[in-house]
Each structure stands twice: as structure tokens, then as C-alpha cells.
Image (cartoon, rainbow, N blue to C red):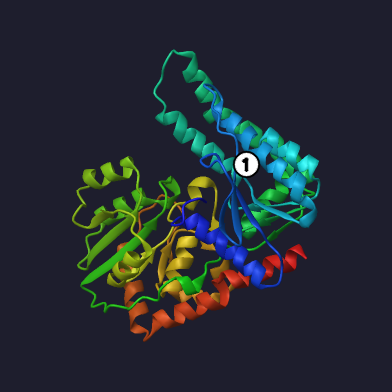
Amino acid sequence: MVNNSSGVQKKILSKIKAINELGVFCQGVSFSNNITAPLIINEYLTVIPFEKKTRKYFNSFYQQKLVFIAISKYLNSQIKSFTHVLFRYPLASSPLLRLTKKFNKKFVFEHNTKEIEEVALQAKLFRSSLKFSIKPGYFIYLLERGYLTILQEKVLGKKIFKYSKSGIAVTSEIAEYEKTRQSKYKINVVTNGIEVGKSKLRTPIDFNGLELKLFMLLGSQNVWHGVDRLVKSIANYKGTCLIKIDLIGSISKEDERLIDYYNVNDRIRIMPSVNSETLNQCLNEYHLGIGTLAAFRKGLKEATPLKTREYMARGFAAIIGYEDTDFENHSEFKKYCLQVKPDESLIDFEVVVEFARNIFREENHHLKIRELAVKYLDTKVKMQQLVQLLD
């Protein structure tokens, strides 16, 4: 949140700004141990320092404790100014349980995933990447990162929900999931939005059926992006249309090796993250955007990723591997979205090419996609829904 170019910061600031523009007072507060004095980002956001200490063992749990001490201290002095504390659910922990007990029925948690399933997946990936050692530190680290996080989520999560005011889920599937964890947990759905006006409308290029240019934005290295599925599918494609894909952002070493293994470097290019001005220019070179292709790996069949919303805001049709809550609720999106099977099967790029042909037969389709984004996906629309639910 200290980084002014951070996508996370921009997302949260846009939400806080939209809530205030609705006439509801909302103050953003973040905590960092990389600063020594409070840092005012703007009228909506302040970053507060917390103690910078480390421990040799169980350091992640110690850091949780330190940050929650700082949060508790802030709320002690400020809680009377607020009716709700809206908090992206940070995973269960003993300090969070103590905090929700202390400020009973004040917290509203935002849920972006099935937490137990995602934590279990991350723990599995961590265990497989950790080199075996007979040193005590190996077993302590394995316990800390590989098992205790899952146990905390299973045992403490339902207790934390009991003391919270309510919850907000970004999909209907996640809302139902959280209810199974704590039957008395009051939870509603507000899907992810994007500040559409901040995304530059693309200038479309023609599609002649001979060459199809695709891109995928990657803000992080996660298996549920499905880069490996994309690589295997393009290696299997034997059609006459030349397909080129640019992966813009951060990909794992495993995915890089897979591109080399299948010898598709001439069709899949890795590009580093670029600033927004450069991105606006380079995205004019593409026909379609590629969204998340493997949400099923963390137990999700439904999702509302920000990158797909950015594609729509820019006027791109998209390829996705999940059910999008907004697209399901508003059927106007359906013809601008190709939903591939939510499993490990290869993507049929003949179908992708035909999808592109249909999109580009429609005159000014980019303007129509943008209009839908403004109507249904904009942050202002989502925050209006949120405020009504909280009220």
C-alpha cells in the first residue's frame, strides 16, 4: 500500500473513493513495518507503522501478532468514529480471533476465495518445493507453512465469523461455502468491480483469420492462472491460423521451463510488467484477452477476477475457464466471453479462432463491451450495492 504504482493500492483507493462519493464516510487504513511514522497517501488512505522485529522460528505467526497489536491500538482510539470495520479476510489466526472478540459485531469480512482449499493448495505446493533436511529448522518451517495454517483456518475460522458483524463474498459460490463453515454467519454477495474510466478503451485491429494475437495479464505467479494449460494447448494446436500469445507480467520458472520443453517460444512470448501508459499502447496490438483458466485448482467453479473486468473495460472479449458471476447474472456478456472447460483438458484453439471471427464480425463490438462494463462492472455500481447491504 506504500507503493503508488501498486494495483492493489489503486483497487482499494477506488473503492474507498466511490464509497465517500456516495455520501458515506470511509477511511482507508493500512499497516506497514517498512515505515517509522504514519504516511498519508491521500485524503482517503493512511499507512500506519508497526513494530519491526523478527524471530528465527514461527516468524510469520509473530508478524501476525505484531500487526494485530497495531490494529487493536488504532481501533481503541478510533472505533467510535465508525459503524463498520471492512476488512479483506486475512486468514484465521489467534490474534484475529482476539480482535473480533474485543470489537464484537464490528467487523465485516470480504471473502475472495474458499480459504481452506486455497491454503491447502498453497501448503501442498510449499511442501513439494521445500528441500528435505534433518535440521530442526526444516521440520519447524514445514509445520509453520505446511500444516498449521490449514489447522488454524479449520479451527479458528468459524469462531472468528461468530464474532463478526457480517461478510461479503465476491461470488455466490463463496458465499454458500462460508455459510457451511459457520451457519450463523450473515453473508451477502458483492462481486469485484473496476474503475472503468481508468482503463483506456482500445483501438481495435482487424482480424483476417490468418493471425490471432492474444494476451494474458499476470500480476502474480499462481497455478490457478493456468499458464501451463495454455502452453500445452498451443503446443497441441495444428490449425492454419497462426496464434501468438503474450504473457504480460510474472510467471513461474516451471511455466518458463514448460514453454522451452514444448518448444513454443515462437508462439508464446514472456513480457515483463509495464507501466499503465506503456500497457495502454501495447494492448492495441491484440484481438482477445485470456483470463483465469484453472480456478478449479483451488476448488472454485465461479469467480470474478479483476483482470477479466479490465479486459471488458478496455473493450476486449475474453477467454475464461470458470463461471463469472456477473456474466451469469447479465446475459448480455455471454457472446463476448468464451468459457472453456473448467478442468485439465486442452483448450481447442479452433473454437477460439471461430469465437474471434464471430466477435470481429460485429461492428464496434469494443464500444458495446465497454458500455456493459460501465453499466455492470464499475466500482461505483459495486460500492452502491455494498453500502446498501451494510446499511
Which residue is the extreme one toward the bottom? 363
Q: Residue at x 60, y 41 (%)?
A: 116
From what the image shows, is residue 116 above or below residue 55? below
In the image, residue 264 lies at what x, y percent? 21, 52
In terms of secondary structure, where does tag 1 sit? loop
Q: Residue at x 52, y 67 (%)?
A: 194
Q: Residue at x 40, y 30 (%)?
A: 129
Q: Where residue 360 sits: x, y (%)?
A: 33, 80
**Whole-percent x, y for residue 318 in the image:** 41, 68
Taking depth in this image into account, of 74 and 188 the one nearest to the observer is 74
Quick check: 183 left or right of 46?
right
Above-or-below relation of 367 to 175: below
Quadrant in the rendering for residue 290: bottom left
Instruction: Indicate left or right for 142 with 340 as reference.
Output: right
Q: Is residue 337 visible?
A: no
Q: Is residue 297 visible?
A: yes
In the image, residue 257 lies at what x, y percent?
Answer: 26, 42
Quadrant of the frame with the C terminus: bottom right
User: What's the amino acid at mark 1?
Assistant: Leu
**Residue indicated by mark 1:** 91
Q: Is residue 167 left or right of residue 287?
A: right
Pointer 1: residues within 10 angstroms few (<14), some, or many (20+)?
some
Say which of 311 and 328 sits in front. 311
Q: Which residue is at the front of the view, 183 or 6?
A: 6
Q: Residue at x 45, y 13 (%)?
A: 135
Counting every numbered tag in the picture gives: 1
> Horizontally, is 239 left or right of 8 in the view?
left
Residue furthest front as drawn: 37
